[in-house]
Image (cartoon, rainbow, N blue to C red):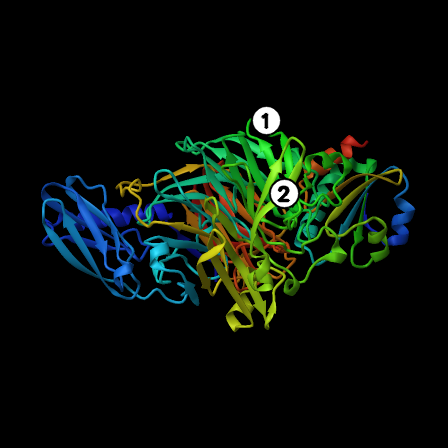
Amino acid sequence: MGVLFKEVEHIIDRQYQAEQEFLAEYAKEKHTIANPYVKLNPYLIAPLTALVMFENEKPAFAKVTVKGKEKAGDMMYRPVSDSEHMVLPIYGLYENYENTVIIELSTGETATLKIKTEPAGEKLKKPTSMETTSEYFQDFVMMVSPTSPAYTAAYDYAGDARWYNTLNLAFDIKRARNGRLLMGTDRLVAPPYHTSGIYEMGMIGKVYREYRVPGGYHHDEWEMENGDILILTQYLPRGTVEDACVLVDRKTGKILKEWDHQDVLPVYPVGGSGSQDSHDWFHNNAVWYDKKTNSLTFSGRHQDIIINRDFETGKLNWIIGDPTGWPEDMQKYFFKPVGDGDFDWQYEQHACMILPNGDVMCFDNGHWRSKIKEQYLEAKDNFSRGVIYRINTDDMTIEQVWQYGKERGAEFFSTYICNCEYYGEGHYLVHSGGIGKKDGEYLNVPGASMSEGIENGSVQLSSITVEVKDDVVMYEMHLPANYYRAEKLHLYDEADEVTFGCGERLGSLGVTEEFLTEAPAEEAGMIPDDYHAKIAKEADRLVFKASFEKGTLVMLNLEGINGAPNRHYFVPTTKRPFLAMCVGTFLDHDPRAVEFPVSGEGIQGTYKITVTIDDKKYETGVEVTF
Amino acid sequence: MLKEVNSAEFKELAGKGLVLADFFSTTCGPCKMLSFVLKDVEKEFGDDLAILKVDFDQNKELTAEYGVSGYPTLILLKDGAEVGRLQGLQQKPVIVKLVQDNK
C-alpha cells in the first residue's frame, strides 16, 4: 500500500555528477596520446559521442577523423585545442560498431583509437529509403525530432545514424550562435506536450542551461541577434493554450517582453480551421523574427493564418490566409491573390519564415484545405507542400512564386507538424514528417496519438525529407516514424566548445495555481495500490502520477508541517480531446494515467502529501520540503 | 438557495432575480469539485442568488435551448436574461465577481 516515491535528479545535476566522476577517474593517472583517456557517452544521453583527453608536452592543434564505413563516411574536424591539455569531443560514431578514430596532432604525434558502441535499440529508427550522393550531402547530417516513439537522431548521406539522444526531446531544433542546440525540454508541465522550457545543449549531450518559462514551452523558439530567446508559450490559468510568445533574457532567464495573440485576434470560433476548439483556438506553432522590418511572424494552425506583428508595439501588420468567413473589420489585414500562375492558400501550416528578399515561406500541410466544412478534403485527395509567397504590403497583394509537394499528392500529405528550410535562392528543404496510414488508408488526423495502433501495426507512420535545388530533388530520406522537424547541420561546430562545471537552471516554472476550496472527505488510510500512485520530487517541483477513471474528483493536498499552510491542487482526470496531438511521445499507454506537476516556487516549507479521491482522503506516507 | 432542478422547475425559477445555472454531469470530476465551490458561493450571497443545478444528460432540451455544449457550464441569468457565462471549473472569487458585477 502507498505510493512509489522517488527523488529524481535533474539532468543537469546527473550530468555534473557524471562529469565529476570521469574527471576524477582521468586524474588518477597521467594520460598522453599514447594512452589517452576515452569516455564514451560522457553526459549519459548521447551514446554516439565520446571525450578523448590527454596531456601533451607542448600546446598543439588536433585533427580528429572518425572513420566511415566507407571513405565518404569519414567525419573530420579540427577542435579548438591549442593547449597541452587536450579535451577532444568525438562526434559521428556508428551505433553497435567498433569505430576507428584517428587523432593527429600538429606536433606530429598520432593515435588510432578503437571505440566500440552499444546497440541503440528500436527507438533509433533506420531510414527505409535514402536517395542522395555523398558529393551533394558531404559530411552534413539530417537531425530529426520525433513526435511518435523514436529518438532524436542525426543521419548521414548513407542513412547511417551518427548521433542520437535518449532524452524525450521534442519540437524544434535550432543551432544557436554558440554552436549549441536549442530544443524543448523533456519535463512535462501540462498535458499533452507542454514542457518546462528550452535546453541549451552541446552536441556532446551536456545540458548547459535550462530556460524555464511559467506557462511552459511548445513548438518553437528563436534566438535573437543578442542571444535572447523568443519562446512560444501560453497563460495556463486562462484556460487557453498556444497563444502567446515571450522574450527571455539569455543570461538570467527572466522574461523581458510578451506578445499575447488575444490582443490582436478574435478567438474561437472566428477563422477556425477544421481542428480549432475554444481551448486551442490559435495553435501558434512557429515564430520568426525579421530584422529588416523589426517584426515577428507567427503561424497559427487553428486559424489557417500566418500573422505579422510589430516587435516593439505588438501591432498586427498583416495576415496571410484564406479570408473566407473572417469578420469585415479584419479583412483589411488579408492579402488579395494576383498573378497568372497556380495559387492555393495554405491551411494548418507550420514553420513560417521571412526570406532575405521579404518573401514568406512555410510548410503548407493543407489539412482540411478549406474554410468551409462541407468542402473539407479527405486525406487521399489532399496534398502538402513547401510554398513561397511574394507579398506587397502597399497594395496588399500576394503571389505564389514557388512550391514543392503538391504534385506528389497524398503520399506526401502530413496532417500535422513539418518544416521547410531556406539554404539560398532555389535551394530548399521540405520536410513532410507527419505522414500516416491506418489499415492502408491515409490518416486525416495526427498519428502521434495512436500509440495502440502503432504498437499493433495497424497504424504506419512515416516521414519524407526532401532537399530541392533549382527544382531538382537532391536528397530524399524516408523514416518509419513521425518527426516534427528536420534540420541539416554539421555535428562539429567550433563554437560548441566542451566546458566543465555544473549547468544552470534559469527562469521560472511559476507558481502552480492552488484550488481555494477544499473538497470534504473522510480519512481513509493509505492510498490503495489500484491507483498506481507515484510521487517524484525534483529540485524545483514535485510530480504526482496515478491512474484514475475518467471523471474522478482528485485533489492533491500539501498539508503544512511546522507552520507551513495547507495547499490544495485540483487534478484533472477528464482528458481534454486534443485535436492537434503534435507530439505523442509524452502520452501514457494507460488512458487513465494522470500526471500533475506542482512547482516548488512560492511554497517553501515542509508538507505531508495526501490525496483526496471523491469523498475519501488518503495518506501517501510522503513528506517533502521545498 | 442551491438546489438541483429539472427543466420544468428551472423554467419556473429562472425568470426572476439573479439565477446561477450550473449545467453539470455526474461523470465529471470538475463538476463534482464545482458543486463544493457553489456551496461556498451560496454562503456568500444567501437569498440574493438562486443556484440551480441542471443535470446535463437528463435535460437535453434545456441544454440545447441555452447553447450549452460542454460541462461544467455556469450561466448567470438576471430576470431571465443571460448576463454572463463561464465554462469549466472555476474558483470561488471568479464566480463571486461575476455575480457582484451583475447585481
Residue located at (41% from left, 33% from top): A227
- The residue nearer to you, when weighing A125 against A189, is A125
Q: Which residue is mark 2?
A: A399
Looking at the figure, which quarter contains the C terminus of chain A?
Answer: top left
Q: Identify whether A588 is placed above or below A23.
A: below
Q: Position of residue A606 (x, y in %)?
A: 45, 41
Is residue A546 visible in the rendered image? The answer is yes
Q: Is residue A301 left or right of residue B49?
A: left
Q: Quadrant of residue A284?
A: top right
Q: CA distance from mark 1 to mark 2?
A: 28 Å
Chain on which label 1 sits: A
Number of dots carrying numbers: 2
Q: Quadrant of residue A100?
A: bottom left
Q: Is residue B12 left or right of residue A104?
A: right
Find the residue positioned furthest to the top. A313
Is residue A592 visible in the rendered image? The answer is no
Tell me the tag on residue A197: none
